[in-house]
Amino acid sequence: MKNSKTGYLGPQILNTLLPVGLAFFIGGIIILCIGEDPIEAYGIMLGKSLFTAKGLLNTLHYASPLLLTGLAIAITFKANIFNMGVEGQLLLGGFFAGIAGASLDVSSPILAKILCMLVGMACGVAFALVPAILRAYFHVDEMVVTLMLNYAMIKVLEYLSSGPFREAGSGYVCTPIIKEGAMFERLGINNSRLTMFFFIAFAVLAVMAFVFRNTRLGMEITAIGKNPEFAEATGMRVRRKIIILMCISGALAGLAGAGHMMSEKFKYTLAFSGTTGLGWDGMLIALLGRHNPIGILLAAIFFSALKTGADNINMYTSVPKEIVGVLQGLIILFLAVQFLDERFGLRERARKLKSRKEA
């Protein structure tokens, strides 16, 4: 049994480390071409974001929403459902959590924070419910629906933030700043940006790890992912489970948006989720973490370290911080190749085609 488990984990670890190693290798060649030492550059980038107290705490802070978006992707991908709407769910959750935080007149800071997070989760669920029903009962491809809804949601929130909910007198498009009671204050450890939201995200991760490993729902997720027809034949209500999983995914994404609003942004702007988007980053993290909660934790911290290390590499070397974007793009490319191979069996098909030609 032990040997079997080790044999299973070996390829998993290799498939995780290989895209990262290839990306860093190609990135190292680029750094050499501009006349810098890649080992020194990588040492500064990762050393100051992972191996100093303040750097590590800031990395954990920025990893908080990534933990949740990675989980939101993983719980559906593991069941062979493709929720590509995590970015839109995060934006919607963050937007209305911000509106709630700016509008609610609640004397208790704890209650204010809980209400804002619940609003964010409810918005994420509402976004995910439509494609979930379409997939479960009408066999509409949820990948296409959720992907297109992202762009529709961006435009809707752009209108709301520049019109009905725009902060009066602001020189740029934004919503009102949330009240102090709804904010996650910095903990003040080593002058870092870390807040309680990281521990909330980590607690959610621990709960989802337990669900994946020790509950009936976790076993059903695996069964649906491997063979939905067989799962239906054994009495599992697959349609109902699809809706439940999509709603859980939406709630996680909405919570990520609410937490990002309450711990980092404090108001909604057109650049709320960043240029790439925390939801899209979550897809990379889920793939890099192999849809496993522990893997997602490590991948989120690693990915956050790249982002926090970008400023350090620009400050202490002549390497532009855009090299981090190149590394991220390369990792995405190699992970995408793996994902397509796992879903469509490209290598196996190529092997069969080659054997037919040889025969």
Image (cartoon, rainbow, N blue to C red):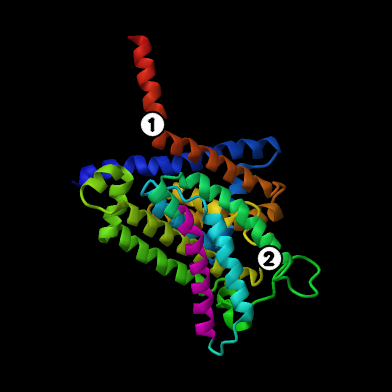
The image shows residue 184, relative to residue 52, as above or below, that is below
Residue positioned most to the front? 138
Tag 2: Cα neighbours inside 10 Å, few (<14), some, or many (≥20)? some
Q: Amino acid at mark 2?
A: Leu
Which tag is nearer the camera, tag 2 or tag 1? 2
Residue at 41 percent of width and 67 percent of height: 204
| Callout 2 secondary element | helix
Of the pair 88 and 46, the residue shown nearer to us: 88
- Whether residue 209 is visible, yes or no, is yes
Give coordinates of residue 103: x percent, y percent: 63, 80
* Residue 203 position within the rendered picture, expressed as x and y whole percent measured from the top left: 41, 69
Residue 243's place in the image compared with 113, above or below, is above
Residue labelled with disc 2: 160
Secondary structure beneath dot 1 equals: loop
Label 1 Cα neighbours within 10 Å, binned few <14 / some 14-19 / many ≥20: few
Question: Which one is earlier in the sequence, the residue at label 2 or at label 1?
Answer: 2
Q: Which residues are magenta?
A: 109-131
The overriding secondary structure of the stretch rendered in magenta is helix
The answer to whether residue 351 is above or below residue 356 is below
Residue 189 placement, left or right of 179: left
The residue that appears at 55% across and 61% down in the rendered structure is: 90
* Residue appearing at x 71%, y 38% in the figure: 34
Q: Amino acid at mark 1?
A: Gly
Q: Residue furthest bottom?
A: 107
Q: Which residue is mark 1?
A: 345
